[in-house]
Image (cartoon, rainbow, N blue to C red):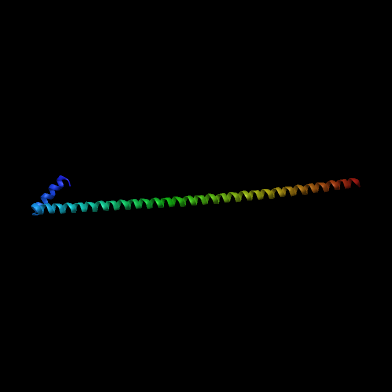
Amino acid sequence: MAAKELKALVDLGTSLGYTGEDLKQWLNDEGMRVDREKEKVEELKRQEEEKKSAFELEKLKIEAEKESERSKIEAEKRQEEEKKRAFELEKLKIEAEAERAKIESEKEKESERMKLETEAQKESERW
């Protein structure tokens, strides 16, 4: 206990009528009471700090969960977009193959038509 606090307690004890041994006992009891109060205050501060720490930890956990969920959603979006691109690519391949088959078919028809015309022309030249 600081000198000012001790002097204030002595003055208070004296004003309350304590003297001699009674004053010493009262100062001892009062000092222990003050110490207990300080311990209570310190305990309350410690508990408050623990609450703040627990709150901050919970806040960090929630933020981490949000970020994790955000990342998961973004990954799902990218995967979905990749599926769409793959689908579009496959669609374009099928369309290109269909167009190529159509052109090939037209070429074959034209070739067959020309062959028939040539044969018909040869046949008409024979007559």
Q: Nearer the viewer, residue 105 or 61?
A: 61
6 relative to 110 in the view: left or right: left
The number of discs equals: 0
Residue 70 x, y percent position in the rendering: 46, 51
- Residue reaching furthest to the right: 127
Q: Position of residue 123 (x, y in %)?
A: 88, 47
Which residue: 25% across, 51% down?
Answer: 42
Who is closer to the viewer here, 62 or 93?
62
Could you say which is closer to the camera, residue 110 or residue 65?
Answer: 65
Q: Is residue 79 left or right of residue 4?
A: right
User: Which is nearer the eye, 93 or 116?
Assistant: 93
Residue 33 point in image, percent of width and height: 18, 54
Seen at 23% across and 52% down, the residue is 39
Q: Residue at x 42, y 50 (%)?
A: 64
* Residue at image location 32% in from the left, 52% down from the top: 50
The picture places residue 73, in percent across and down from the top left corner, at: 49, 52
